[in-house]
Amino acid sequence: MFAACRYYDGRPELGPTSNWERSWLASLQNSECFNVTTFHPDDFGPESALASDSQLINIIQENNAEYLIMIYHNDARWRREFIGFEALKLLDKRGVKIICIWGDIHSPAQRQLIRRLGPVVRLHIVTASETIARRLGTKFNIIYSHVPVSDKTVSPCGCGAMVSFAGTLKPERKRVIGKLIHAGIPVHTSGGEGNAVLSREEYLRILSHPIALSFQDGGGLETIMNARPYEIANQNVLMLEQWGRETAKVFSPFLEYIPWKSASDLIESIQQFSTDTVLRQRIAEMAKKRSSEFTDAGIWKLVIEQAGSRDSRFSSTMTLHKVKKISGAQPRLTPIIDRMLSNYKVELPITFADHILRLLKNLLYAVGQSLANPQFVIQKVKDAKCLK
């Protein structure tokens, strides 16, 4: 049984659920490890979990389901649980193996949910940060996983831009992309989940320009790796990913993608790789080859094996690079990369000073939003109360 929202954030007015849920369902179906039945708790409304819990238990019993695999997601506006804790306790008591998939492990609210569900969840599948997953792993049975991506390679949209970014234009992203445009580099930007702007194919057509940008600004003080690097690698285009330790554990920096710290890094790299087609394609092909190692069958065979035990254990669907610092041991591909390597002789984890600067930037942004729009604060307080 696979349980996830049918609609984005469980809200019909926002349209079909995000590609996160659809990607994991497709991975389950492609693995050929399970006969999959789907269940959508949000079909029963945001007020109470009683009706959906009853229906879920009946369907699991009728299908003799051995596993309940769920993407546990409560929208802040809900007054109910995604699946009630008492229902999960009953299923666990009946021998159903409950497995949770988590994509925002850097969120304190999500870690709080993991701890709350700990007594009944047999296995947690975690993405975004191996570091945070390991911190939880002393108490929980955890698999650190890649994000399953099964999209076919598509052609770019045809706008002629060399560079693209597919995603929401948050303030920091907008600032960096603005500097690229000011430097005379056209960037095709569009996207963002939950606003019914792009179909999946439209999103991929933007992503599949010769050079695709990716940011690491979603984890607060923690560096994270979202789904975009896997999507970019799968499209066989050059990834320019913001500096951070998590991506460097999965893909080799300067060999399978190009990291960047500042807009000036980006401008220099884009100017280089816009003309050096051979090297650009070589790096993209190496990332594509790396991503091809991550298979649906690999995830779910490991899940079946590890879910058979309640003992705490940490494992991964990937062979992770033990990256401590960029050094002269890296191959010298071009003069520009040689120069960047000489500037990046600091350990890959973002430094403490970087953390403090990012915290101050986020604080200033929140203060600015509060002064400009008092409703911003009121809504944040309401959302926090709903989460509690």
Image (cartoon, rainbow, N blue to C red):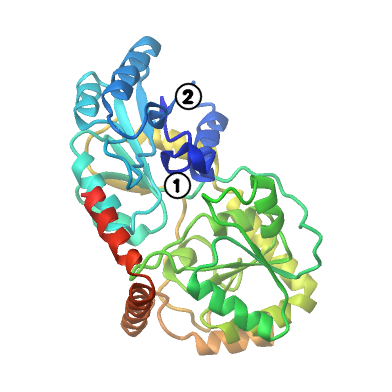
Q: How many marks?
A: 2
- The label number, if any, that marks residue 317 in the structure image: 1
Q: Of tags 2 and 1, which is closer to the observer?
A: 2
Image x and y of residue 297, in percent: 52, 35
Q: Nearer the viewer, residue 12 or 88?
A: 12
Earlier residue among tags 2 and 1: 2
Q: What is the crowding at mark 2: few (fewer than 14 residues within 10 Å), some, or many (at least 20)? A: some
Q: What amino acid type should be assigned to the residue bearing mark 1?
A: Thr
Q: With 126 as the anchor, is 167 left or right in this view? A: right
Residue at 50% x, 40% y: name it: 13
Q: What amino acid type should be assigned to the residue bearing mark 2?
A: Phe
Q: With 209 as the anchor, is 59 left or right in this view? A: left
- Residue 117 in view (yes/no): yes
Image x and y of residue 272, in percent: 72, 81
Q: Distance of mark 2 from mark 1, alpha carbons?
A: 18 Å
Mark 2 residue element:
loop
Mark 1 residue element:
loop
- Please, is residue 254 above or below residue 53 in the view? below
- Please, is residue 332 above or below residue 50 in the view? below
Residue ID for mark 2: 34
Image x and y of residue 251, in percent: 54, 63
Q: What is the crowding at mark 1: few (fewer than 14 residues within 10 Å), some, or many (at least 20)? A: many
- Residue at the outermost top position: 62
Residue at 46% x, 22% y: name it: 37
Q: With 332 as the anchor, is 311 left or right in this view? A: left
Do labels 2 and 1 touch, CB within 8 Å? Answer: no
- Residue 330 in view (yes/no): no
